[in-house]
Image (spheres, rainbow, N blue to C red):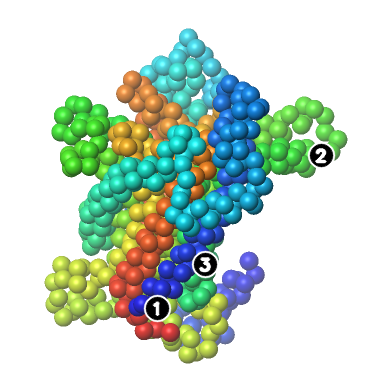
Amino acid sequence: MFRTLFSRFLQGLIVLFVLFTITFFLIKALPYGPFQSDKAIPGHIREKIEAYYGLNEPVYVQYGRTLGNLLKGDAGASMRLEGLPVTDIITQAFPNSIQLGVVAMAVAVLLGIPLGVFAAWKKNTVFDYGAMMIAMIGICIPSFVIGPLLAEKFGRDLEWFPVTGWSRSSPLSWILPAITLGLASAAYLSRLTRAGMLETLSQDFVRTARAKGVGELAILTKHCLRGGLIPAVAYIGPAFAAIISGSVVIESIFAVPGLGLHFIKAIETGDTPVILALVLLYGALIIVANFVTDVLGVWLNPRLRSSR
Amino acid sequence: MAEPALALLPLKNPVSNPVIAVNVSAEQGTSLWKDAARRLKKNHAAIAGLVTVTVIILACLILPSIAGLLADPNLQNLPNKNQPPGGAHWFGTDHLGRDIFSRVLFGGRISIAVGLITTFVSITIGVCWGAFAGYCRGAVDAVLMRIVDILYALPFLIVVILLGKTIEPLTSKLTEAAINLVAGANADSAQVNTTRTWIEPITTLVPLFLAIGTLSWLTVSRIVRAQVQNVASMDFVEAARSLGLGHLRILFRHILPNSMGPIIVYTTLTIPGVMLLEAVLSFLGLGVKPPNSSWGILIEEGSNRMLSNPWLLFFPSLFFSLTLFSLNFLGDGLRDALDPKSAKD
């Protein structure tokens, strides 16, 4: 166990290093920089700005310096939001993103997996088709349509939940954004759970269990759920990372002060320190999420522990 | 084509193989595919899906090609703007007076092309990648999956911006080459122009296909890997190995067919994903150029006016959802039909 953990930790460091390198040179290849504005900046001022940020040095020197600073734990300051340290941006916005992501993922798992199990159990009946239709609605209607509709109905008309005014301490304000963000993943999860459960339900040991008179509920939950969840669990890791990093639309609909908007703005302006820090943060998140997924996968299928 | 025919030969010629002959007389010469087709026919939801999706695809392919049948999808008619559905405009008109019915059908061509081609690319890459990682395990698995981790975390937006910048000049070259190829080197300008009208929309989509196809296979590979790991640990794989079968044969003939369920399901889930991704990329300037359109773009435009002019959102969404619902039920039906174990039900 410790060997696996250590090995995956080293692999994670390599991934982050490669990620840093590729992203750094991608940013340098962008056709624009952080100090472009409608008004032409006079040449000598531009030179001063570039010298201040070290942008006039050769690219490999900039690369080495940025890497060195990051290793020392210094992520630098934003170029767009002048002088604001990157660590401040992250400590302000990341907790909101994480919280929204966790609640949205909970919505997805609690909605999607039971729906998928139910559909597989009632395979090819009206209930199955109904459940899968609900799932497909979640997939076919994009969040930029569902979000405003939910806000209009449950926020403005019924006034059940606040539309804007995200606050980390008031759960009511989480509901609408989390549902909007989690709905598509819930739909994916239910489809994948159904597929996995059907695969497991058609195996011989299930027939044996039925012949022995085991109840349907016990067959579903005790015999089949572990095997049936394998595709769904493999999806959860990537989905969680995508939910955390891909919430820009939801952030702007419900005015959530998260990282997504910072990320887009940073890319639009070529704000190197912010882009690098956020890419590395998302990268770390993906590495951890996929590692947890792999551990869960082994737990779901004990045969993977011993084989080879 | 030659190989399947040879493989079927013993079945069609029962005298050559008495053991199979017994089976044939009992089952009236069914093959795996005939069997699957028979099971598929019994599945009403799947057949309804197949019919619907065929009708929509044919409508999008044929109706716009008949000259004079549909209004020009890009013709602006400002006095006629924001008309609700009815009369001359079945699906109404948008804020520039363009006919939504013909915009939906013309846009459907692009969306269906994008959906099918990029899904094919992404599923092919994803399945192979995930299958090798899941089957080989160990160091190969680690390297393949860490590459996936890196690609997940790369800032997609920057990649798309750079791809658009570097590929734009190449696409115009590609367009010229394709026109030369089709119209012939010494075609007159009229011929070149008519060829251009249908070739240009296709070649300008190539960067889009590349961008979506290369970036949307990551999750497929993770799911296939988990599934292959699971199936590879089953007893029949052990049996196949003890019979001396090669790794590739075990992987592609025994493990993958038994992992088909989640793969088919994820395929039907990838299609709507890439269709909506196309709208985002087109918005960023990589893909469909205005005034041309697609379902994704129409849905995005419609969502801006969904409370005042709901038909702008409703009709594109209807076609989009109907296609995906149908593909979905067709996919489920195919999964059931291809699964020999479901023959017992």
Q: Are marks 1 and 2 on the same chain?
A: no
Q: Which residue is mark 3?
A: B144
Name the spot of residue B101 as percent of width and height, x first.
Answer: 46, 27
In front of the other: A57 or B310: A57
Callout 1 environment at 10 Å: few (<14), some (14 to 19), or many (20+)?
few
Q: In terms of secondary structure, where does tag 3 sit? A: helix
Q: Based on the displayed image, in which of its 4 quarters is residue A52 positioned?
A: top right
Q: Please name the residue shown 61% across and 75% down the image.
A: B6
Q: Which residue is denoted by mark 1 in the rendering?
A: A3
Residue type at tag 1? Arg
Residue highlighted by disc 2: B184
- Asked if badge 2 and badge 3 are on a common chain, one would say yes
Nearer to us in this view, B336 or A136: A136
Q: Which mark is residue A90?
A: none
What separation in Å lies between label 1 and label 3 (alpha carbons)? 20 Å
Q: Position of residue B133 (x, y in %)?
A: 49, 70
Residue placed most toward the observer, B33 or B30: B33
Left/right placement of residue A83 relative to residue B65 reads left
Q: The disc labelled 2 sits on which kind of residue?
A: Gly
